[in-house]
Amino acid sequence: MMSAHSSGIRRFFSILVVVLLASIASAGIVAASTTDLRDFAPVAFDGAVLLPGLVVIGALMSLAIDDVARSAVALVATSILGSAIFFFAVAAPGLSISGVRVGLVDRATNFALLAFLLILLFGLAGMVVAWLIEMVVRPNRW
């Protein structure tokens, strides 16, 4: 029999895993759709795939966490971590080559802010879609 404490720890670590995987997926889909990193990605996406992909990631996060407040906080953490991963992917070559350091770090800062907003806003749209579908499917829960 599990205690409430070990159940809470298990839930916390499962949310951390969801945030980590969603951050990597979000940073990857943003990176695969930009002109800077498209050539290095194993699969290059068009810009038309970026926004629906982020909506799907947000919906899957909401379904995996299964709590409105926790999934919203997890989305903010995902946006911060995903944009940080994307920042370091763009800025990393500039840290070792002094001739392009300022340009790549500046470009990475701008793109990371854009990635943060994209992941946050379209992830939230996916969460709202998942919540609305869940309200229709399981009305007694709400």
Image: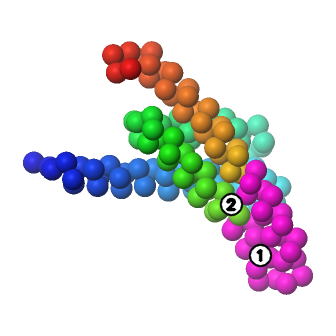
Mark 1: which amino acid?
Answer: Pro
Depth check: 74 or 101 in front? 74
The label shown at residue 17 is: none
Magenta-highlighted residues? 88-114
Residue position marked by numbered label 1 in the rendering: 93
Residue position marked by numbered label 2 in the rendering: 86
| Label 1 crowd (10 A; few <14 / some 14-19 / many >=20) | some
Judge from the rendering whether residue 32 lies leftward or rightward of residue 6; answer left or right.
Answer: right
The residue shown at (78%, 62%) is: 109
Is 124 located above or below residue 43 in the figure?
A: above
Task: Check contact, mark 2 vs mark 1: CB within 8 A.
Answer: no
Judge from the rendering whether residue 43 lies leftward or rightward of residue 138; answer left or right.
Answer: right
Q: Which of marks 2 and 1 is nearer the N terminus?
A: 2
Asked if residue 63 is among those painted magenta in the image, a careful observer would answer no
Kind of element beneath mark 1: helix
Q: x and y percent of residue 23 in the render?
A: 57, 54
Is 101 located above or below residue 114 in the figure?
A: below
Display colour scheme: rainbow
Q: x and y percent of residue 39 in the render?
A: 78, 60
Q: x and y percent of residue 115 in the render?
A: 71, 51
Image quadrant in which you'd find residue 137: top left
The residue shown at (56%, 26%) is: 129
Principal secondary structure, stretch drawn in magenta: helix
